[in-house]
């Protein structure tokens, strides 16, 4: 079992069951869109975020991002971290049909993928804290000059970047910047962007 200091926020009970098999942490399942009409759940999350810190781990589909954004807006930014699973097509074993967007959710991910997502988010696991990559901070200006924002084809290049790094395609520009500063340094980003630009020529 891996001990995670932060309280982990997931969408549903099957996600909680999945994580509980290999992670020792407080895990709160918000029961999908029910969280929108449950101030008690949000209050509990806020309390735990103040005490232990919180990490939001939702599916990478549109519903997951709506739930993530709702919870995020209810918490002080310094108390919450964001863990992202990659876009992987498929369906969970217990389901007859894949979800609307055809992507695996948290419950369908390998344990190692979930653990990696928590590490990348900066969670404290077994007493060791995941830290942001050292080196010069990547800025929005860097994204622009590397062709990853504000230019023709930049959205496609960001999608390619997200795929390379194993993070969801729907991630916002600000969240992407935060993740980049955790996952790569400036020189590595330049190399990835150069490879993407070469593929698009």
Image (cartoon, rainbow, N blue to C red):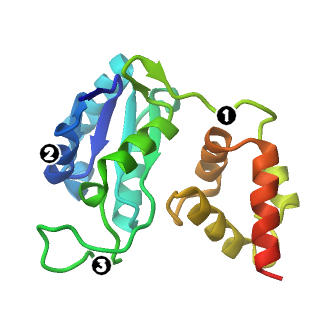
- Mark 1 residue element: loop
Return the mark for residue 100: 3
Query: Label 2 belongs to which residue?
Result: 17
Q: Where is residue 107 in the image (x, y as percent from the top left)?
A: 24, 56
Q: Position of residue 92 (x, y in %)?
A: 21, 67
Circle 3 packing at 10 Å, graded few (<14), some (14-19), many (20+), is few
Q: Is residue 182 left or right of residue 128?
A: right
The image quadrant of residue 32 is bottom left
CB atoms at circles 2 and 3 under 8 Å apart? no
Out of 113 and 79, give the one closest to the viewer: 113
Query: Label 1 belongs to which residue?
Result: 133
- Mark 2 residue element: helix
Taking the image as drawn, is residue 153 in sight? yes
CB atoms at circles 2 and 1 under 8 Å apart? no
State the quadrant of the C terminus. Answer: bottom right
Q: Kindly identify the residue that appears in the image at 34 percent across and 64 percent down.
A: 63
Out of 48 and 2, give the one closest to the viewer: 2
Q: Where is residue 70 in the image (x, y as percent from the top left)?
A: 38, 49
Out of 143 and 193, give the one closest to the viewer: 193
């Amino acid at each position: 079992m891996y001990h995670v200091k932060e309280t982990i926020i997931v969408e549903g009970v099957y996600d909680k069951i999945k994580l509980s098999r290999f992670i020792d942490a407080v895990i709160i399942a918000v029961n999908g869109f029910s969280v929108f009409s449950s101030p008690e759940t949000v209050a509990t999350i806020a309390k735990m975020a103040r005490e232990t810190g919180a990490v939001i781990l939702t599916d990478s589909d549109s519903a997951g991002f709506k739930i993530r954004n709702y919870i995020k807006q209810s918490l002080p930014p310094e108390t919450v971290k964001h863990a992202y699973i990659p876009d992987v097509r498929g369906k969970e074993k217990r389901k007859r049909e894949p979800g609307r967007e055809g992507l695996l959710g948290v419950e369908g991910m390998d344990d190692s993928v979930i653990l990696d997502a928590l590490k990348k988010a900066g969670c404290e696991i077994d007493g060791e804290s995941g830290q942001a990559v050292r080196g010069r901070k990547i800025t929005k200006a860097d994204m622009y000059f590397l062709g990853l924002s504000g230019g023709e084809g930049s959205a496609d290049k960001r999608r390619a970047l997200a795929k390379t790094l194993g993070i969801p395609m729907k991630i916002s520009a600000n969240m992407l910047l935060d993740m980049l500063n955790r996952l790569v340094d400036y020189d590595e980003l330049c190399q990835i962007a150069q490879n993407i630009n070469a593929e698009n020529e």
